[in-house]
Amino acid sequence: MRHLWSNNNSKISPLRSCLAPVEMTQENSFFLPGQITGLYALIKVLFKEKRRAGYYIHLMRRLLPLILCCFLFAGCARQPRPPRTLILAADNDVSWLDPARAYDTSSLPFVRILYRGLVDYGDGANIVPAVAKRWSISPDGKRYTFYLRDDVRFQFAQDGSQPGRPVTAEDFRYSIERILDPATASDGMTFYYTIAGAKEWSEARASNEKNPPAHVSGIEVPNDHTIIFNLAHPDATFLNYLAMPFVYAVPREWVEKLEREGKSLNENPNGCGPFILKSWVHGRQLELRKNPYYYDPSLPRCDGIIETFGGDNVLHLMRFELGDLDLQNLEDAAPPDFDRITDSPKWQPYLQHAPMMDIRYVALNCEMKPFDNKRVRQAMNYAFDKTALKKIQGKRVDVAHGVLPPGTPGYNPQLKGYDYNPQKAKVLLRQAGYPNGFTVTLWYAPTAAEWYDKAAQLIQANLKDVGVTVNLKAVTYAELKTAAGKRHNIQMSLMGWLQDFPDPSNFLDILFNGQNITDTSSNNRAFYNNPQVNALLDAAGIETDQPKRLAMYQQAEKIIVDDAPWIFILHTERYMVHQPWIKGFQLHPMWSARYEYVEVMK
Amino acid sequence: MVQAPAEMAAEMDLAPAQSGFWTRFKRHRLVQIGALLVLILVFTALLAPLLAPHDPRQIVANPAHPSAPGLVLGADSLGRDILSRVLFGARISLLVAMIAMLTSVIMGTTIGLLGGYFEGWVDVLLTRVTESVMSLPTILLAIALFVVIPGESISMRLLKLLLAISLVTWTGIARAVRGVTLSLKKREYVDAAKALGCSHTRIIFLHLLPNVLPTVIVMATLAVAQNILLEAGLSYLGQGIDPSVASWGSMIKDGEPFLLAAPWMVLVPGIAIVLAVTGFNLLGRGLEETLETRR
């Protein structure tokens, strides 16, 4: 359409050139010359025909919506696709690119490809070597020795050139000590307290002692390629903790240089992972590119990743169906959209699903009335009809009978849990001394999952039937987390827990051990404290014989379900759909995505 | 936003000044349509329990299947009857809009009368307060008030909603009333009343108030329309009474994800809002003509 600009050829319909940008997919600009030319020509032609000013004003009023539409369509003109690049979209920005701070589903998929740790997960939940080429564990289960590869390099050298220096055992010691330093404010700090001397080292740092010990006593670095961890007690899950991105290698001199310059690792990541940060415009877009010096030359399989932020699930699904996005999570898709995609023969070959390994629940505060009464808590479980949620969410959810999701070691298929039985609920409430019910407030975060809002309303309607009035308090997820972690604060909160690794301890110990109750940020959100359960969980934590250990966890879970500190609701099944040109995408039981294995054939 | 009365109904023909209210009312087709819509709305709200086939809070159908058999307009995302919820939604809309309107009318009229009548520093103070409230975005201010005021039960949330809406919508009325008062107080009858030694209270309530009433009635009618929109907006944003209580705004929010699969879930409450707001706006603008507030 450009010729219009040069010779003002008004024979070509001005209207057509106005709308033309819709078809122009190669133009990479919002204000397309063709469109401006079209408008200009249109106005000119109109002005030649008649001269009365009022008429033009009238005409322009009529045409204004059309003109606006043109601009709107121009906005939709697709940007050209960079080759072999994975295009993604998310509702919200990534929270952290600093491995010490990242602990949510928006950040982890990126942090784990910018950095690398000693070990990683294989195609399943099995631990495989990463930067450590092999390791050995002493017979008593307390001494772990890792032997590092010598061909792993950081992405950037101190002066910003590539590649950086080789990764050494000292870097891993620094990364763990960085987590243990309270000044870092990492959510993972207590996970590494099993290392001998770690807790003491951390406390010494916090108390500003004059001469804090330079290093954690339990970590030995005999040479550049060997690191040894001595544990305070045997821990069957220690390797799992080392696979978490918290302790992925970061170069000390880089972090310290950034600190001196008033910058942060969060904005300037430098790891040894398969991708390098290209740009991160907060709230808008994150762009990664391939790390050409990655130690495994077969990875990554695509040249880059672009994730744009903003919009919502409806918009993302629409863009996915137009071919603008490569992967689409169906977790929060509206039921009709979910059915449409999963039933369509077009998408079925590209659909994948796997258990999310989570539990969604209502925490009933066992320290506050009326939920200090076991009968009341059980009544809540009988009163709520979980199958209604199953009807809304369809294949995406499974009714929970206990705490552990199916597939976790130690999952107990015999556990019956609670069925919908309002009559029994009423009887229990009467026995507990609440024949006329009571009023409670349910806190929930409609933003955390699309269906939480529905769940809250269903709970409200179901409990109404047994005489309990539920007021709904909708807050943001951050508010809910803070409020639910505080002692004697809220009675009821609708929450979810996603595993860190598939082990019963990651559910039962964190969420139900009475010793994990804290006054301000308790993960035990029901403030459930049963000495019998605590003893079982503590014993299972240091047991190394797996069947014996799992039996203890099963016993603990049984007592917990009977005590009903929660309304046990659902386990979720993850559904992802990808474009035909995406190869190698595989849902993983541990990571929400492993982008380095994804190939983009476009 | 409520406009100043002088700007309203600019395109309407002026009725001859000497004819009576009813004559002028009969002449205005639009005000009749508005009155009809408002009447329908009021009757729907009053008779909702008789008209609605189901309890609006009861789950009567399979959830997430909008075209539920047996229900005229289908079911919402939880399986509640949409028709019943729209009918009951009229109650919430009307209740909130009317009560908030009354509160804001009382506040606005009082402030406008006082400012216009006394002038001087009283007027300066009240005008500044009015203007500062006006300068804040209405919906943001309402959300802020709603979040700040404590209380989570349904009745408390209703009260909060009323308070939030009326505290942000009185400013237009105050400004209009002040303007009318300023011109009225220069009339001869006010001078006469002053000369006879009438107290300020008497002048304000017996002589000025009846004469600003036509303006207030017009502004109030328009305020109802504005309040209906504001309530729907707040409910849509999740700051409404309670998701279980049927409100048009929360119904739109509920139906939003189903926009392509079941567009009526959004369209039905949407049309209800449009009709209600149109009704009150037409009535308000028509009344402005028939009550001769333009002078």
Image: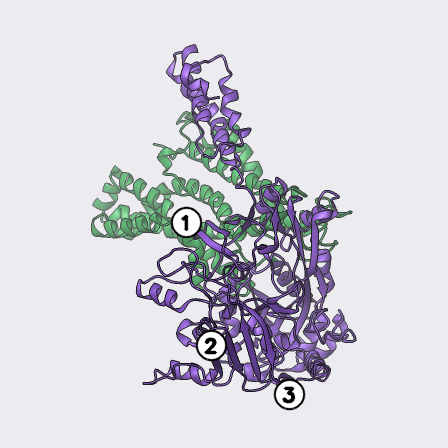
Chain colours: A purple, B green
Element marked by disc 2: strand
Label 2 or label 3, whichever lies nearer to me, is 2
Query: Which one is nearer the viewer's eye here, A264 or A495?
Result: A264
Q: Let me know if marks 1 and 3 both belong to one chain.
A: no
Binning the other alpha carbons within 10 Å of mark 3 as few (below 14), some (14 to 19) or many (20 upward) gives few
In space, the residues marked 2 and 1 are separated at their CA atoms by 66 Å
Q: Quadrant of residue A556?
A: bottom right
Q: Mark 2 or 3 closer to N-term?
A: 2
Judged left or right of residue B239, residue B243 is right
Chain containing the residue with disc 1: B
Label 1 or label 3, whichever lies nearer to me, is 3
Q: Let me know if marks 2 and 3 both belong to one chain.
A: yes
Disc 2 to disc 1: CB gap under 8 Å: no
Judged left or right of residue A304, residue A383 is right
Find disc 3 in the rendering and name its residue.
A539
Is residue A316 positioned above or below A423 on the image?
A: above
Label 2 or label 1, whichever lies nearer to me, is 2
Q: Quadrant of residue A374?
A: bottom right
Residue B138: which disc? 1
Find disc 2 in the rendering and name its residue.
A223
Query: Which one is nearer the viewer's eye here, A324 or A110?
Result: A110
Is residue A434 positioned above or below A302 on the image?
A: below
Q: Which amino acid does the dot numbered 2 rest on? A: Asn
